[in-house]
Amino acid sequence: MRREIPLAITFLIGVFMLVDFFVPHTAVTTSADELKQWGIIVIAASILLGIGNLVRVHSKKIARRNEGWGYSIITLTVMAVMLWLGLWPGAHLGPNEMIGTVEQGTPFNWMFLFMQVPLQSTMFSLLAFFIASAAYRAFRLRSAEASLLLIAAIIVMLGRVPLGQLLTRNLPEHAQLPWITETIMAYPNMAAFRGILMGAALGVMAMGLRIILGIERSYLGGEK
Amino acid sequence: MARGFNIRSIDRRIIFVLIFVAVAIPLIKPMGLPIGVSPPVQSLYDAVDALPPGTIVMLGGDYSPDSMPELQPMTIAFLRHAFKKDLRVVITCLWPASPPLIEAALTPLVEEFGKEYGVDYVNLGYMTGGPVTILGMGNSITGTFPRDYYGTPVGEIPLMDEVSNLSDVALVMEVSAGTPGTREWVQQAVSRFDVRLGSGTTAVGAPNFYPYVSSGQLIGLLGGLKGAAEYETLVGAPADATKGMDAQSIVHALIVFFILFGNVVYFVSKRSAAVADGRSRS
């Protein structure tokens, strides 16, 4: 019964949500709306699970003095500080510094805007350096396919910036880099992505049916 | 070229320094390169511009600080356009890090255009759930977002009296860096609730969404910093994205140079090796 009951619930809910898509009757939509709210609550609860898991993993690392355990202390400390600043209503740091609110000027907002934002932006901006280095070392004309990819990449890279427009502005419109770029994006690129999308959609539908019908049971866990 | 020259022997720090210089100089001394407008950006601008004053639009801000340099200018340009046209804006976020970024974009614009919170715009903040939340908004926005970003019950916000579900919103502009984002909006809202959807995405994500532009499921698309710069140009307020385009132009040109140079070195090395091999055999 430990498996049959969850499978039955999955089947009933899955079929009911399909019915909701095709039958816009109040009796159906009202119940479906309620189920969607439950879904949001369940997903929200998973955030708590995530926090619990984070604390467990890093606490274990600190207790065992595993490599990098100092970073785990920083992770847990910063998480605790942000939780305190974000959740503790009514506490005050100073006369104008409210804790437990998210408005601009509050410590929570300050920590986010002036610590998390620059840190994350810096990490992401480093990509430009690595992409340039990788492009120099790895992008080679080794085959016809690679050559095609490389030519398209060069056209799109130049056509997506004003420099490409400047370089070809005196040519006929259809020979200008921005026009060629837009054509590459709107036709060959679009055709390829449409194929991928349709394939993925069919896969999702098949997986959905497998779950509803109880063929796919890996989400229940404990089964190889 | 020296025989047997190994391109990998070039210190990558030289490349890093060149990239740094290519980014820094145009930012310090802008060149003012011309910015043309691509059809997907023009169609989005036209759709927003055609809305009568007072119309309610929705802005979905779904990104985090890492993609902020690309996407924040889109948010600002769209909000500027909406406020300039006296459109009323409902803001929602499916990413937890988005609301403070949206607030940072809103604050100077609200002061500039003299807009009133709760009447001209409202920030409903973050709600977890992704596609389920979008589905929920199709039936009831107030049910899905019972309180705004500041904890005020939406029933006490005048603007929300006129917004029951997505059918009360004339257009949704979704600025997203990934999942949940544009794809989920297309899948859950466009066909089912007849939502007119525009999108702004990172440059790396934009190619994914061209099928939706072609099928009409997206009324327009802003791709990366270039898309934001184009929208800024159309709105008539060049800002951060426009400034960034000079730097991006030079960096793209430099990367193209690296690719071409790397290939020249590769083929020269290959030919030299083949000649040397032929000599040793003879």
Image (spheres, coloured by chain):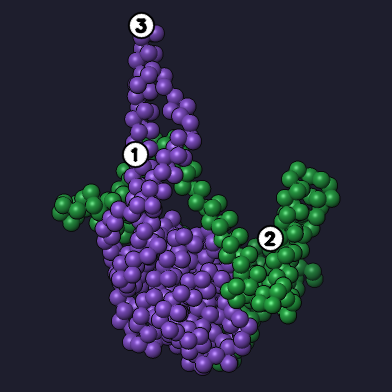
Chain colours: A green, B purple
In the rendered image, which residue does mark 2 sit on? A218
Question: Residue A148: which quarter of the image?
Answer: top left
Label 1 neighbour load within 10 Å: few <14, some 14-19, many 20+:
some
Question: Residue B147: which quarter of the image?
Answer: bottom right
Q: Are marks 1 and 2 on the same chain?
A: no
Give whichever of discs 3 and 1 has the lower sequence position: 1
Residue beneath the point at 38% across and 23% down: B269
Q: Nearer the viewer, residue A30 or B213?
A: B213
Q: Nearer the viewer, residue B138 or B239?
A: B239
Q: Position of residue A194 (x, y in %)?
A: 39, 60
Q: Position of residue B24 (x, y in %)?
A: 41, 48
Label 3 neighbour load within 10 Å: few <14, some 14-19, many 20+:
few
Asked if residue B180 shows in the view, the reply is: yes
Quadrant that contains the N terminus of chain B: top left
In the rendered image, which residue does mark 3 sit on? B282
Residue beneath the point at 30% across and 75% down: B46
Provide the chain ID for the residue under circle 1: B
Q: Amino acid at mark 1?
A: Phe
